[in-house]
Amino acid sequence: MAQGLRAAIDFLLYEWLQAQTLATRERFADHSRETFDAVLDTCERIAREKYAPFNRLVDTEEPRFDGERVILPAATHEAWKAYADSGMLSAAQDYAIGGMQLPYTVEAAGNAFFAAASVSIGAGMLTVGNANLLMAHGTDAQRRAFALHEFAGRFSGTMCLSEPQAGSSLSDIATRAVPDGDDYEADPLGPRYRLRGNKMWISAGEHELTENIVHLVLAKIPGPDGRLPPGVKGISLFIVPKKLVDAEGRLTGERNDVALAGLNHKCGWRGTTNTLLNFGEGRYPVRAPGLDGRGAGAIGYRVGEPGQGLRYMFHMMNEARIGVGMAATMLGMAGYLASLDYARNRPQGRPIGPAGKDPAQPPVRIIEHADVKRMLLAQKAYCEGALALELYCARLVDEQHTGDAAAADEARLLLEVLTPIAKSWPSEWCLEANSLAIQVHGGYGYTRDFPVEQYWRDNRLNMIHEGTHGIQALDLLGRKVLMDEGRGMQLLGARMAATVGRARGVPALAAHADALHGAWDAVRAATQAAWADGDPVPALANAVPYLQAFGHTVLAWIWLDVALVAAGREDAANRGRLQACRYFFHYELPKTAAWLQVVRERDLTCAEMPEDAF
């Protein structure tokens, strides 16, 4: 697996995205392709030694709670230690706080190896996202006491949004935070509150991999009448550590009132704990120096201004959505490489010749059958295309942080439009790749004798967490394509047009260029038709088909751009890229017409279905 994955990453990083040129920028001036390669080598080695051999183990030995602590396999502890020791938690951070000042593009590529080896063990996505949020929106004291220790691997982090009664509908959360005494604003770690409530589906919410767990919790501050404010504008954000700390992040020896209510037992991704947490139920009543314990509740420190919590949390959520897209991509890639290996070694059936099959001939390997090639080519097109998309988005992050003002603003808007695609497209189509990997294996693929069934189970989560498919679709059609008077969509269209113009000069790609031009025109026309009268009900009734068509068009553009680099090169790897591009344009892009038809016509078949008719 590693050889094929590394070759794909190297091509996309250095030949397509030209990531080595980032070393000409001041922030990355100490780096070169050699240092980037050293990081990738380290990640590849740790993933091969500490993650991949234990992927099945963590699937079968699920986390368990003995009433006091969560027990994880020793392999998980060793994998976390190796990851933290590698410095990848602070890879993109400043030298001044122990970071490597790596481009995010290289960090994302390095983390791809861990997701392919064992997404179930997990790496540092939530911890890094948690710390990055605090670096952006926290106080100096909050950064020092929490974020820096997360980057160092001493602490880990979570995001606590959903509740048992409120999943995607965050306006309905009921966790409350009340000021802790008259001097609540005087605490050195920030305004101090007492939180009470329940949070559900919290990944890595309880474990002993680190000294402490830093929970970022969305909650509402009651008004003078004691009622919680309605809607998302009343949501605030709080740091609620599992164990209380002083102003430097040293443990005080007292546990905060955050209690594990239970572990969720999942279809896949079983190596990572998923929890229901109770805040302020009284299991661990707080009696810390300087805190008199008035009123029950877990101690939390407000981040930023009251009522701005969801805006702050989107900093972490958007980062996590790209991380989820990469996880989905790498699970698809792992399945593809496993099924490719199987197809090259499994003899079955005879080829069809002009006279039909000759049963006297020996069986051939299944990779020689056209339909197996179809399934492998589909997987390659989905997974390598998704990997290119995720790395392209990572490159936009670097542009946003280190480009000039105009380039940074353009990158910001492009990321706004592409983030729903970067999360949703791999989570749907790399899951389909996993299904095809099972199909290539036949009956064996449905057993635990081969890894592809676990890849499918692990990947099925990615269409759900960090914003479901439907949420991403509403975000894209309801917000992202309209924001700034559609400027983000215009910028994306301009980049597609540039690729189309170059591809029209390459005879083998000219027809693809024309097809992409037509597909993007159809997306734009459907966008305008959906919002023809400004009524959101018919406009958004088919938001998911719109998301699918938009995503397929983006991936067609990505593949055409990649093909421009591969064109004219006679080696097998680049012939494979050109063939995958051809597959996408012949087999996948035509699907967009049907998806866009219901969007353009504002078809209400689904919206008008009476409940009692189901």
Image (cartoon, helix red, strand yellow):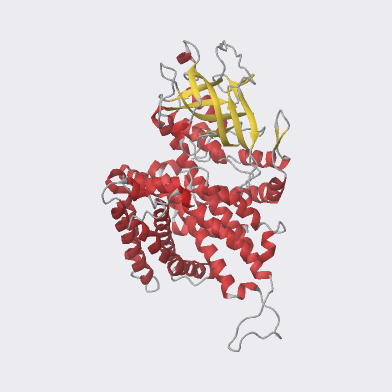
Q: In the image as oriented, which residue stretches furthest toward the front?
A: 612
**Residue 207 point in image, percent of width and height:** 66, 33
Left or right: 563, with 380 as reference point? left
Residue 324 position in % (x across, y down): 52, 46
Position of residue 361 relative to residue 98, above or below, is below
Task: Please state which of residues 133 and 375 is positioned toward the viewer in this rendering.
Answer: 375
Q: In this view, does 381 lie above or below 390?
A: below
Position of residue 312 measured from the top left corner of the image (x, y, whole percent): 43, 32
Where is residue 213, by image quadrant? top right
Question: Which image quarter holds the N terminus?
Answer: bottom right
In the rendered image of this protein, does residue 183 appear above or below residue 440?
above
- Which quadrant of the structure image shows residue 136? top left
Q: Can residue 361 be seen by looking at this rendering? A: yes
- Left or right, residue 127 beside residue 313: right
Front residue (pair 37, 506): 506
Number of numbered labels in the structure image? 0
Please name the residue shown 46% across and 13% down the image: 186
Quarter of the view holding residue 416: top left
The residue located at (28%, 54%) in the rendering is 528
Q: Which residue is drawn at 43% across and 50% down?
A: 610
Q: Where is residue 263 in the image (x, y as percent from the top left)?
A: 65, 36
Asked if residue 210 shows in the view, the reply is: no
Placement of 492 over or under 291, stated as above or below: below
